[in-house]
Image (tube, rainbow, N blue to C red):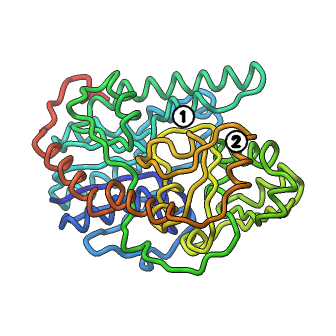
Amino acid sequence: MNILFYTTISPFPQNGGEKIRSCYLLKALASLGHSVHAIIGNKEKTDLEEYAIPGVTFHTHNQPPLTLAERLTGKFYFRQDPSLIRLFAEICGTVDIDVAILDYGFVGQYIPWFNAGRIPVILGTHNSQALHTLQKPANGIVQKLRRSQLVNLEKTHEQRYFPQAAAVMTVSDPDKQYHAAFIDPKKIFVVPNFLDETDYNIKEERNPRLLAMTANFSMYMNFEGLKWLVEQVWNDELADKFELWLVGRHSIEALQQLKGSAEWKNIKAIGKVADIKPYIAQSAGVLIPLLHGSGTRLKCLEAMALGTPVIGTSKGVEGVVSDNFIVANTPESFRKAVSSFSGKGQLGGLLREDFMKEYSAGVNRDRLDHILQFAARKAPVVTHQMAAE
């Protein structure tokens, strides 16, 4: 097949969960033998030749900055970017596209354009976004009103556009259930977040250090989880036993915001790194103290793939199939779990086995191929409303 793949994400370098998801989707599509024309963001101006994937041709398109009016009114949830439409038309004018995959965020407004050209669309979601926004902490009436406005706009976008896709791809069963309230369940498929196991065959000597979340700490759910950890869980006893590293984008700024320093009580913020895998492989364990969010935690899957034990909240390991996590949901129980953790035993190996069964590339290539075959058989029926949009 010839596949047009569009995402607003800049997948490279792979230093964030949403980037990892998009990157491995591209690799899986190419490994299935398809020719992929991928339109991606590249805000960091990465040399894409360093990340070449055989079978994938990269085109770049960065979203234009939102105007104040667009931010206030939410028009961007429904607006089509003319420059992106021209890029779609250019690719479709030179290649007979069999299926388009629109990956991540609020890009449903482009489905009618492809439907008008009778190109079936697979819409890829990374979570239940409106529910995600609803969980965001809001202080005061103004923030609560703004959150309510965004949730309503996002739900309107989802319910207007998502049903027009030939297939919808979610990352977990709870996300599938959410979308089934307004989309035909027969065309909703689960392809969990997954990793290429060959990229995670890393052997490092373990040390007594713990790693926290390996995340983009500017995202509210990661910041709030870190805040809970450092303010309600971490104490002198844990600081005497473990060194805790925060690795990921904006981790330095997050700890400085919370504690006024990039180092506090044996917690050290490292910042953005090009490759998180060696940090996880060297650590005795990974902490995932999330209180918000949805989908499947890629930070959790990376630890599993590297055989590193995980101590997390129920939210932190939500959507991941395994009975081998250490789960604690109160500050007291989480503190006790960390305090009694030794890093010894078989938990890491068992997590690796669970990863291979459900979240490896080999398993999920088959799932992705099934969706492609389903969507390719669904030639869009163009209605007057869809054509007008």
Q: Is residue 244 left or right of residue 357?
A: right
Residue at horizontal 53%, vertical 56%?
A: 299
Image quadrant in which you'd find residue 190: top left
**Which sits in the foreground, 282 or 340?**
340
Mark found first going from the N terminus, 2 or 1:
1
| Quadrant holding the C terminus | top left
Q: Amino acid at mark 2?
A: Ser
Query: Which numbered tag is attached to residue 339?
Result: none
Spot occupied by residue 161 in the image (x, y as percentages of width and height)? 34, 30
Q: Amino acid at mark 1?
A: His
Whole-angstrom CA distance, mark 2 to mark 1, is 26 Å
Residue at horizontal 76%, vertical 26%?
A: 139
- Of circles 2 and 1, which is in front? 2
Q: Secondary structure at mark 1?
A: helix
On screen, residue 65 above or below 37? above
Spot occupied by residue 265 in the image (x, y as percentages of width and height)? 86, 60
Residue at horizontal 21%, vertical 56%?
A: 366
User: How many residues crowd mark 2 within 10 Å: few (<14), some (14–19), many (20+)?
Assistant: some
User: Disc 1 marks which residue?
Assistant: 132
**Which sits in the foreground, 325 or 5?**
325
Spot occupied by residue 83 in the image (x, y as percentages of width and height)? 41, 51
User: Disc 2 marks which residue?
Assistant: 333
Q: Is residue 112 left or right of residue 130?
A: left
